[in-house]
Image (spheres, rainbow, N blue to C red):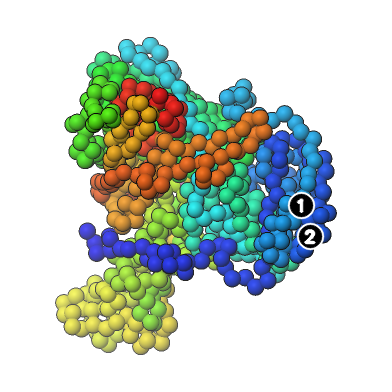
Amino acid sequence: MSKTSNLNRVDGRAKVTGTATYSAEYKTPGVTYACLVGSTIAKGRIKSIDTKKAEWAPGVLAVITHLNVQKPAGYLKDKNPTNLGQPLQILKDDTVKFYDQPIAIVVADTFERMRYAAGLIKAEYIKEAHETDLNKVLPKAKMPGGDRSKDYVRGVENAYKNGEINIEAEYVMPADVHNPMELANIIAKWENDKPVLYTKSQGVEGTRRSIGDVFGVNPEDVTVHSEYLGGAFGMGLHTWPYEVAALIASKKIAKPVKLVLHREQMFTNVGFRPMTLQKMGLSATKEGKLTGLTHEATAQTSTYEDFTEATVNMSRFMYDCANVNTKYRIAPTDFGTPVWMRGPGEATGSFALECAMDEMAHKLSMDPIEFRKRNHAETDQEQNKPWSSKHLLECYEAGMERIGWKNRKNTPGSVKEGDWLVGYGMGTGTFGSSRSKTAVRAKLLIDGTMVLQCSVNDMGPGTATMMTAIGADVTGMPADKIIIDMGSSGLPKGPTQGGSATTSSVGSAVYDSCTVLTGKILDLATKDPLFKKLKIEDLQFADGVVSSRKKSSVNTTAAALLSKNNMQELVAEVESKGSDEAKKYSFYSFSVHFVKVLVNPNLGKIKLAHIVSCADVGTIVNEKTAAGQMTGGAVGGIGMALMEDLAIDHRYGRAINNNFADYHVPVNADIPNQEVFFVNKKDPYSNPMGSKGLGETSLVGMAPAIANAVFNATGKRIRELPITLDKIL
Ligand code: MOS
């Protein structure tokens, strides 16, 4: 274990003491206040919109609708709007595509006057029949474009139908909403005809590109600051209409504009995990060898974007099986567009696959872990490649031990604690572990500090802490002498924070740039009279001090070296990417969630007694932030399993539980004794640290673990999330 593997969050104090600055908090002289006014129908056209009262209200600076908007240059391009990164082109015309679609922007000199004026706007509509129920639009389902979404067949299609023992089942995943604590928020302004944004984004460079595209400006001329995020869970992966709206308004009034969505708009305007219907077919021999696996999914999208995720893909490689086929379809509803949400695709897909595996184990009268072990995939049969590393079996063992799996009985309802039925369940998770091109600049300054710069941002996983730890490990600099400069454009280009790839991508670039920087420091030292006749390999750098390896009393601080050479700083900037060697391997992280539930059969109440989340995610770079990721992801999975459900009143096409009183997410009292176990074995091919992705596999597999535990407790197989008490009774 290295000394940095247990660092506290380097930005923790700033966050908990309120000194961390979130987008809407930047002190901006002359800032004005804007909001979006939403449609009150789900589909149709705006017949008229009366803005006069709002325009005449005190303090109002602008009321912008489709009738008076100066359309951004990008709207006029004949181009697939998806490429704009914000598929809905706000205020483009009079059409309404979903309930609460922005139909007007109101700007005033104070927040209160803005809200008052917004309430004065009245629109009349020409309604058209809408459909927000996925079940009703299934005839419109289509195969989306893109290789990942194509039908997949290995061996015989639908082989499960003729298997020795088979099961067939359908699973329903409702729409879930990200709902980070921090609302979507932005301050937008124009400086010399160039956009400047302080906004909630998971990718500074991605936001530059999409804003550049919308407004017809060079992305390099777009300035984006997104230095702190109060959670995002995927909603910050798109550039959304509210961001474009703030820029449209700012341009019109030539003043900075602040726009913060209200909580209700977080349910309608910034994406969600789409509702998805899934069918599973499995067959096996009596001995428990899988002989057929079919996974079909149809997911909700919007009428203005083909949103896709890899819902069925996990079924192609998770288990050893000769005959596998998958189908993925999307169908448009008259609702806002979905977006990736933590564990996108796999979170939904694992619910079907891992419940079906449990159902099959039950039918075989076999322990569900034993069944999985008999079908353990030694290689990736989809890509026909070896795994870069896979320690899933260790996760099973560790979890069984910690949860007390030996107390589980295969016959449901046979374990009791007082009035409560006891159930044990598990679910396996996985997520791709990729690495993308990233640049990091490492600078040693004359004051003895080291600065690491990258435009990547940190929505909460602890990216700054990870960068500090790796920087300290590589250079030997004390962690408290390392300063992280991140989350703004103009810094060396980092990736979007998404797809569990940040540590692999940014960490590698920190590693590489710090390696080069250390070399430069030692090289400079060889030219110093103090180290005369010593070669670079005779020198070492640690704690900010260069010394002779043979005689450590011969030493000098790096800061002194810079000073002697009249240098203010020593800089190394490296762009890092994965090797060609790595292309020979299949990179996945693996997780297994174990749960013990208590179910009261008379009340239908479910209590989580104990959860254990085990993961094979390569080297753990920081134990605290990794454990935080794992427990946080598991809690997301608990919400998905037991609470979260975006309810739509289909008569109006309207989200009705659009607040935290009615849309439930887990709180502290819902979370039991929670344990985390990491295999912590280095992946030989992933990156210099040997780490794999962690942010998403931490959620994937939790919902089926809970569903399987509820079955083990009660004998009730609940195939529709969330598992609420009415479904138990
Ligand atoms: Mo993640 S859904 O890629 O933020």
Quadrant position of the C terminus in the picture: top left
**Disc 1 secondary structure class:** loop
Which of the image's four quarters has the N terminus? Answer: bottom left
Q: Does residue 727 sit above or below 69 in this rendering?
A: above
Residue located 34% across and 48% down the image: 631
Q: Is residue 45 visible?
A: yes
**Which residue appears at 35% of the width and 26% of the height?**
602
Along the line of sight, the residue nearer the viewer: 402 or 332: 402
Q: Give the vertical position of 339 relative to 328 (above or below).
A: below
Q: Earlier in the sequence, mark 1 or mark 2?
A: 2
> Which residue occupies 38% across, 53% down?
504
Are the residues at dot 1 and dot 2 in contact (C-beta closer than 8 Å)? Answer: yes
Q: Which residue in the structure is indicated by mark 2?
A: 57
- Which sits in the foreground, 57 or 456? 57
From the top left corner, tell me how far across and down residue 517 is, in percent: 36, 71
Neighbour tally class for label 1: few under 14, some 14-19, many 20 plus, Cα within 10 Å: some
What is the total number of numbered labels drawn onto the structure image? 2
Please report the residue visible at 59 percent of the width from the left and 34 percent of the height from the top: 648
Q: Which mark is residue 120?
A: 1
Q: CA distance from mark 1 to mark 2?
A: 9 Å
Q: Type of residue at label 1?
A: Leu
Q: Is residue 155 left or right of residue 183?
A: left
Q: Is residue 252 left or right of residue 235?
A: right
- Label 2 sits on a secondary structure element that is loop
Which amino acid, mark 2?
Ala
User: Residue 386 at x, y = what percent?
Assistant: 31, 37
